[in-house]
Amino acid sequence: MSLLAILNSIQTNLFRFGGPFLIINATISCLLNLFVFTTNTLRKNPCAICFIAVSIANVLFVYFSFIPLVMQVGYDIDPSSTNIVYCRFRFYTSYVFGCLGPFYMILASIDRSIVTSRDAGIRKRSTSCLAITCIIVLALFWMIFHIHAFIFTEIIQFGPNMFLCYFQPGNYTVFMTYYSLLFNAIIPPLLMIMFGLWTIKNVSTVHNNVHPTGLLMNASTNMGRRHIIHSKDHQLMKMLLVDIVVYIIFRIPFTIYLIYQQITQYQLKSSDQIAIDYFILNVTYFLFIIVPAINCYTNLLISKTFRAELKQTFLHCQIFRLVRPS
């Protein structure tokens, strides 16, 4: 069996059997996140609002971007190769929802760095109203920014009876290569790391400045009360930091591939090398979908608040079923 046949068999089976498994798990994970973060105790928290936006963006990304890829690679069903309207719509939605999830996580990271600031004036800027405004602005920005996908995406013939929905050859392909490298691979992880480290620094500074002297009873009482008020903020911060680590781990292979693609874009490649590149692209893309598929389960492992809220949600649903009239 040739190398091309082996690689094609591996990626076909990966998407045919692993794809539906990831889709189901990602759907369940995002829905459970939405159930928890929309509860009365969390839905007014700015970070929880960002998590709601992340979950919505992730599930839309899975359904509008990953499912078509599963159908294309795993089942050899690709309407985008024959329908130009669907071709452009698929690329547009893939890029919009692909950007929204990471940038909403960046927004949550910014909120956590604000909440943990020593400056009370800065902490006051962490509000649900500002979070919702930023979420809407980001959504509108990326929706407008990616309109070019409706104009410069075409159905390209790569060989005899081989048509593929892709970018227009030339300057637009070069632009999209740099765009993918910057906005899908480099900028989001760097910003998440920066604000994540900033949050950790703020938390360590606050802990180092707490003196158990008890000289002022009122100050001591206020400090304790403040700690109780922000206990959920601390749990949300833990979930966010773990989400950032998971995102970076599963994003690294895709980032490395995009850097490699940028370095070798002007090299002449054999058909075997092109097949290997396509195989690596699909596998690294597949790995990235693991992030929304396990997000809920990492939250369950590390956060008592998340577990408690999820338990209460299930209890309320069960009680509702019991008291509902037949």
Image (cartoon, rainbow, N blue to C red):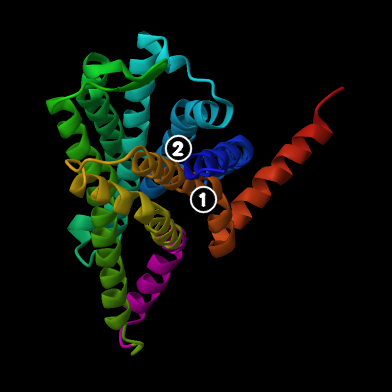
* The label number, if any, that marks residue 58 in the structure image: 2
Name the residue tied to disc 1.
Answer: 295
**Of pointers 2 and 1, the one earlier in the residue sequence:** 2
3D distance between C-alphas at marks 2 and 1: 10 Å
* Residue drawn at x 40%, y 45% as measured from the top left: 276
The C terminus - image quarter: top right
**Of 31 and 160, the residue lying toward us:** 160
- Residue 293 position, x and y percent, is 54, 45
Left/right of residue 162 with respect to residue 211 in the rendered view:
right
Helix, strand, or loop for circle 1? helix
Residue 158 in view in this figure: yes
Instruction: Residue 65: give x, y in percent of width and height.
Output: 44, 29
In the rendered view, would you say 2 is above or below 60? below
Q: Residue furthest right?
A: 326
Mark 2 near mark 1, Cβ–Cβ under 8 Å? yes
Q: How many marks?
A: 2
On screen, residue 219 above or below 173: below
Determine the residue located farthest toward the front in the rendered image: 1
Q: Is residue 226 covered in magenta?
A: yes
| Whether residue 125 can be seen here | no
- In the image, which residues are magenta? 215-237
Q: Is residue 110 magenta?
A: no
Residue sitting at x 27%, y 81% = 209
Residue drawn at (72%, 38%) of the image:
317
Residue type at tag 2: Asn
Work out which quarter of the rendered image holds the N terminus and state it: top right
- 5 or 61, which is in the foreground? 5
**Horizontal and vertical percent position of residue 263:** 19, 49
Q: Position of residue 187 (x, y in %)?
A: 22, 49
The kind of residue on which mark 1 rests is Asn
Q: Quadrant of residue 158?
A: top left
**Name of the residue lying farthest toward the left:** 171
